[in-house]
Amino acid sequence: MDRNPSPPLPSPDQDEEEGAGGDCIGSTVYSKHWLFGVLSRLIQIVNPENTKSSSDDEEQQMELDEEMENEICRVWDMSMDEEICVGILGNMACFQEICMSISSDKNLGQVLLHCLYDSDPPTLLETSRLLLTCLSQTEVASVWVERIREYPAVYDSICFIMSSSTNVDLLVKVGEVVDKLFDLDEKLMLEWIRNGAVQPLDPPQEDSEEQPVFKIVPCVLEAAKQVRSENPEGLDVYMHILQLLTTVDDGIQAIVQCPDTGKDTWNLLFDLVCHEFCQSDDPPIILQEQKTVLASVYSVLSAIYASRAEQEYLKIEEDLPLIDSLIRVLQNMEHCQKKPENSVDSNTEETQKSDLTQDDFHLKILKDISCEFLSNIFQILTKETVAQGLKEGQLSKEKCSCAFQNLLPFYSPVIEDFLKILHEVDKTLADDLEKSFPSLKAQT
């Protein structure tokens, strides 16, 4: 034969049975059923019991050998595909014992991390999937964290993928790996944050190619922009990475210290909450789908906003759209947490699900973050901004009532200062709000 034959086409029955390619190995067209079939027939051929046969049988055996030759060549061709090998290991790693065996093999670990330097997207995807599987196993997660720490080039490879790839599936999986790493090990996260700030000691030689210096925040932002429209779950992952970065001071500085990075981060997140998530024409229940990503986005915006005195790109006129977004989220939250009027107390599954909604952990996190961010904005509102908010509707009586209801009593001083300004702009509205919240009138 001049070349290895092409992989076999699936039969019509397989097409019908597997639908969207569920029988394929990795992203290839090799069929799992075909592979198992070839291996089973090969075992039968080499079985010693089949070697004793008549001359007729020998002729049949020869014909079978010729038939198997093509199949064996296909298996050989498949085994040379790095993507398939890593993909098979990824499937095997789903079993705890095998995952522990793979993880304990130092040489294999080095080979797998080296696969991250590959330029083939399917191989990178399968490698990332395998790494995520291992990092998700409590027994071996620390082994992989330390192994990755020992290979600084992994940082460069992952940053390169995030900053340059257009493969959404790959970006999502790599994002999940980074998110898991940062969640598992704050020390590693700090090392990766500081990597971009370290400049090479020696200038590059004239005949040498200058290596790019990757910074984690711009790489995360580029990946987030790429997955934004095609994969909401992927965007959620990258927003959570940004949120994890803001849990340490070095992470916040990595965002705000460079004006371009801070501006890009602010503009992207501002656009998400003011023009994409939880809009006025969305049903309130949409909050259940967007609660985790909104919590991450508001958390990062709040961290940037806290350093607004140093940031020229934070504009006063953007305060009102943010107030509008935050209050709408709080209004929708009230709707999501309401029990149906016709509900009755019982131990039925429906009632239990309703109770879970009442005490939704993620909604509570979102509420806490939203209230803190809203209080920070309220603290710097001027008389002119309040007047504009009343005129444009962001500070209507209904919205102010919602804000007061959620901010009291924890942020009472903030609300009291806001009321003083409101008295100067619209005394009637200020008096109405004080009547609705008697505790405020008693303190003023």
Image (cartoon, helix red, strand yellow):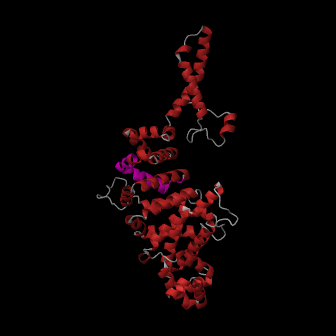
Up-down relation of residue 267 to residue 213 (above or below) = below
Asked if one can make out residue 285 in the rendered structure from this viewpoint, the answer is yes
- At a point 70% along the width and 64% down the height, the residue shown is 342
Does 76 appear above or below 22?
above
Is residue 271 rendered to the left or right of residue 346? left
Residue 29 in which image quadrant:
top right
Q: Is residue 116 magenta?
A: no
Residue toward you, 53 or 180: 180
* Image-quadrant location for residue 101: top left
Q: Residue furthest left?
A: 202
Number of on-image labels: 0
For the point 52% across and 53% down, the residue is 172
Pick the residue in front: 209 or 161: 161
In-image side of 136 versus 64 (left or right): left
Q: Is residue 147 magenta?
A: yes
Q: Position of residue 32 (x, y in %)?
A: 58, 34
**195 left or right, relative to 350:** left
Residue 1 visible in the current orientation: no
Range covered by the magenta-colored residues: 143-166
Residue at the spot x=59%, y=57% of the render?
230
Task: Tell me: residue 295, above or below residue 311.
Answer: above
Q: Nearer the viewer, residue 110 or 299?
A: 299
Q: Position of residue 434 (x, y in %)?
A: 57, 86
From this viewpoint, which residue is outermost toward the top?
A: 54
Q: Is residue 195 above or below residue 146?
A: below
In the rendering, at what x and y percent does residue 104 appear?
A: 38, 40
Of residues 232 and 204, the one drawn nearer to the viewer in this rendering = 232
From the top left corner, tell me how far across and down residue 259 is, in percent. Answer: 43, 71
Label the magenta part by its dominant secondary structure.
helix
Where the N terminus falls, by quadrant? top right
